[in-house]
Image (cartoon, grey):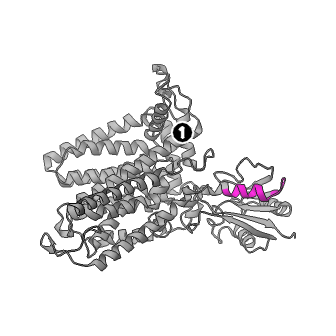
Amino acid sequence: MGKINGKIILIVVIWLLIIGLLVYSRFINLGWGLPYPMHPDERNMANAIQQLSCEFSIRQLADCFNPNFFAYGQFPLYLGYLLVWAVKGFRDFGKIIINFEEAVLSLRVISAMASLINAIIIIKIIKNIIKKNSYLLFTRRSFSEGGSFISYLLVIFSPFFIQFSHFGTTESLLMLFYSLIVYLSMRLLERRTYAVVWLALISGLAVATKVSSIIFIIVPLITILYSLRSWDRYKNLVKFGMLTVIFIVLFSPHNLINFRNFASSIKFESDVALGKILVFYTRQFFNTVPVWFQLTKVFPYVLGWPVLILGGLGFLGGLGFKDKKINLLRFAVLVYLIPSAFLYAKWARFMTPIFPLMIVFAVLFLLKIKVINAITHEPDQRSVQGYPIPNDSFGIWVKIIIVIIAILPGIAYLSVYQNPDVRFQASNWIYENIPDNSYILSETANVVDIPVELESYKVYKVISFNFYDLDESPELQLELKNHLRKADYIFVPSRRIFANHSKEKYPILNQYYDDLFNEKLGFKKMVEFSAGLNDENSEETWTVFDHPVIRIYKKIKSF
């Protein structure tokens, strides 16, 4: 009896630790970077929330809760507004004044909560696949004793979950909605037709969050066609389609009410994504190879190499092709991956809905490798569905080591939010070490210029120089020479310029940075600030918003 009670206590303690780590990883330092608008999409959404108001007048219907911002749908904006309204005491609905920090924090809380719920959905997907699956040699009991711990550890310490939980943008919500769609589609494979209504609601919310997520709808549509009998199939297709449209309009009404503004905004966003409009912040994608770019610049950093390898092996065939739910999971990945990978713009956020699904593949593959009984269970000679469970304690230790290695990238990524923002660190150093009135050459188009204003404020002449047009503009080339003569210091606030321009197309720009880094311009690097993650070679938006690498150079001789 004492041994049983001890085991129960141990399991309870482990689960409390798991829950604590999950909450901690999502909510630690949600106020990072404030009051500065460190993320441009977050800033735009927060500004839209600040504009929301309503006089509840028929004559002003078109302006009632109109965000005047259509790059995203209204659902996350309304959700953020409701959260602030609730915190302010449920008073003056439609008239409350919301400051920028309140708007940002409401969006970040939504992202963190969506990530928490997504963790539960991922475990439910894994359990649903494992349930009575003799082909994979799994049982519910074997999973509950150890597999769920492994699953939660990989979910908790996934770099992408940690980052997007701290961004007040749409990515966490879209990941949650896609995970829910996959889970409900699996239930539909079991002929649970109630799932159709839930699929319509989640699909509607997804499109009401971001219109491009209409691609999510392919998964439930194909599932309905595949899983149901002919009459049920067409009846549920009609039900699904009608309800989805209703939910889209209900939760993002101004896409219809102000259709002209909505269509104009979506056209611009799609033209940028397709490369029809070339802007400075998409130059990193010039001449990039679809799929290869994501495999080398996105997935290794957002998942970590161990999870990418495990998930990739499971996806490519390590789990076999007999199980229809695993094949549905593969289909959901491919449905989203293929069209998104071939866009001109290949931002990490364009891949977010399939990141959680790769964790599912990683967990299933890890659990399937030889030893299938739980970490907390002493190996024995029992069998599952007639298959023997190997007595292999060495294999269990191998799995433990694999799990530890797999969570290291996420543990490292937590340091981004456990420490002050690198722009605050750099600004403190600048005020302590750079004299008043120094002439500083910096770069334009960063989300926040350094130094940010802190208590130890000094006055500097900071030139926010347009390096983007340097090769095309002789005037800028002359200005740069003049600034280099006058400058006491040079700031390189991030990799956005020097790492995003090919030498063939921008030779003058690249020559400038080569000369700066090799100290040929008469400047020597004094200090470098980073989060210590060694991920600057990733797709740029993975680093520049929350942990850019900042380099500061001091003039050591004049020419």
Residue 141 sits in which quadrant?
bottom left
Q: Where is residue 390 in the image (x, y as percent from the top left)?
A: 21, 77
**Magenta segment, principal secondary structure?**
helix
Name the quadrant containing residue 143: bottom left
Q: In which quarter of the image is the C terminus?
A: bottom right
In the image, is 166 to the left or to the right of 21?
A: right
Quarter of image, res 396: bottom left
Mark 1, residue position? 103
Observer-nearest of 264 and 358: 358
Whether residue 447 sits left or right of residue 299 in the image: it is: right
Q: From what the image shows, is residue 37 above or below residue 330?
A: above
Total number of numbered discs in the rendering: 1
Q: Position of residue 173 (x, y in %)?
A: 41, 48
Q: Is residue 264 visible?
A: no
Q: Is 438 covered by the magenta stretch?
A: yes
Estimate how packed mark 1 is, as few (under 14), some (14 to 19) or many (20 or more) residues with alpha carbons within 10 Å.
many
Please say if 187 is above or below 209. below
Q: Residue furthest right?
A: 559
Q: What element carries label 1?
A: helix
Front residue (pair 57, 133): 133
Q: Tell me the magenta residue range.
A: 425-439
Q: Which residue is drawn at 76% across and 48% down?
A: 457
Residue 472, compared with residue 66, is above or below; it is: below
Residue 286 point in image, percent of width and height: 57, 65
Going by the numbered disc 1, the residue's amino acid type is Ala
Q: In which quarter of the image is the N terminus?
A: bottom left
Task: Report x, y in % for residue 219.
Answer: 29, 54
Indicate left or right for 346 with 193 as reference: right
Please say whether residue 497 is one of the residues in the magenta stretch.
no
- Identity of the residue drawn at 54% across and 60% down: 415
